[in-house]
Image (cartoon, rainbow, N blue to C red):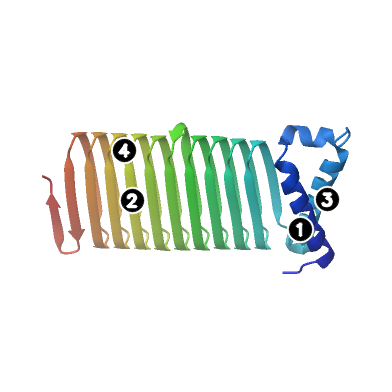
Amino acid sequence: MITHTFFQTYLQQCHRHLFHESENQSVGSSRRLPSLFRDGIAMNARLLICVLCSLCLCPSVLGATNDALFTQSGDVQRGTITHMGNQHQALLSQRGQANDTRIEQVGNAQTATVQQHGAHHIADIVQIGDGHATTLLQEGTTNQITVNQGGDAHQADVRQGAFSHDSRATLGQFGTAHVTSVYQDGSLNTIAQHQEGYANMLAASQLGDDNYIAQEQTGTGNQASARQHGSGNTISQTQVGQNNTADAEQFGQDNSITHMQIGDGLAYSIIQEGQGLAITVTQDSTGTVAISP
């Protein structure tokens, strides 16, 4: 990476100055551009110069064609976009209070889009490799999303509903050509998904409160989906091998499904509805064992 010493030094000075200025006032994105032509021209001119200096330090200006669009409105928000490589695109839009977002892309041809509305959101995206695409949308309060992709050509789509409170979603994809999708609406919901290998697909959705989904896949061509409606429900699925399929769905409260498949070409599907129900399924190439208390 090429660094211009003058721009780097001046940029650090601008950041320090803007940090002290931001402690005494909040500048909304809708007011910044017009204020360049009013009494606040000095402050906003420094902000503009800082942005230009940042672009000069960005590989896009040095011929790497990286793009970043940053929009904020509200109070006490943070946003960091780092591009290392070529042909990256990042879009960050925040409204509300005390949001915190970090986007880091290393490699080539990565795309990241983050939109946050409300207050106390946290979104953290790290993409390493080539050809990844991540889209995040959060609405509500105190939501958290962490996406970590390594390898090549992954897709991640994460949404958390308008009334979500303290929801969490943790995603990890390693290998090649994985697809994951998450949707949550409610309070205190948690989803953690992990994929390794090649061309695996994971989908999860939760509606209600205090639900938990954990899915893990290793191998090639595996597909797993989990859906929950209600409160206090848990789904755990693990697949190891190739071309396995798992589908689990629950309605009600305090239900649990634990499922594991080891082998190739295995298939599993279950729907559970009620309260306090539990089922455990273990399946491998030699047979199926199911326990349902």
1 or 4: mark nearer the eye = 1
Question: Picture coordinates of residue 115 (x, y %)?
Answer: 58, 40
Nearest to N terminus: mark 1 or mark 4: 1
2 or 3: mark nearer the eye = 3
Tell me whether the residue at label 2 lies in contact with that at label 1, contact meaning CB atoms closer than 8 angstroms: no
Q: Which residue is mark 2?
A: 214
Q: Residue furthest bottom?
A: 1
- Give the alpha-carbon distance from disc 2 to disc 4, as whole Å: 12 Å
Q: As shown in the figure, which amino acid type bears the numbered disc 2?
A: Ala
- Give the alpha-carbon distance from disc 2 to disc 1, as whole Å: 42 Å
The circle drawn on residue 49 is 3
Q: Which residue is mark 1?
A: 12
Nearest to N terminus: mark 2 or mark 4: 2
Residue drawn at x 43%, y 44% is: 168
Q: Which residue is mark 4?
A: 228
To which quarter of the image does residue 276 belong?
Answer: top left
Residue drawn at x 58%, y 48% is: 101
- Mark 2 secondary-structure assignment: strand
Q: Is residue 272 left or right of residue 77?
A: left
Please identify the quadrant where the C terminus is shown.
top left
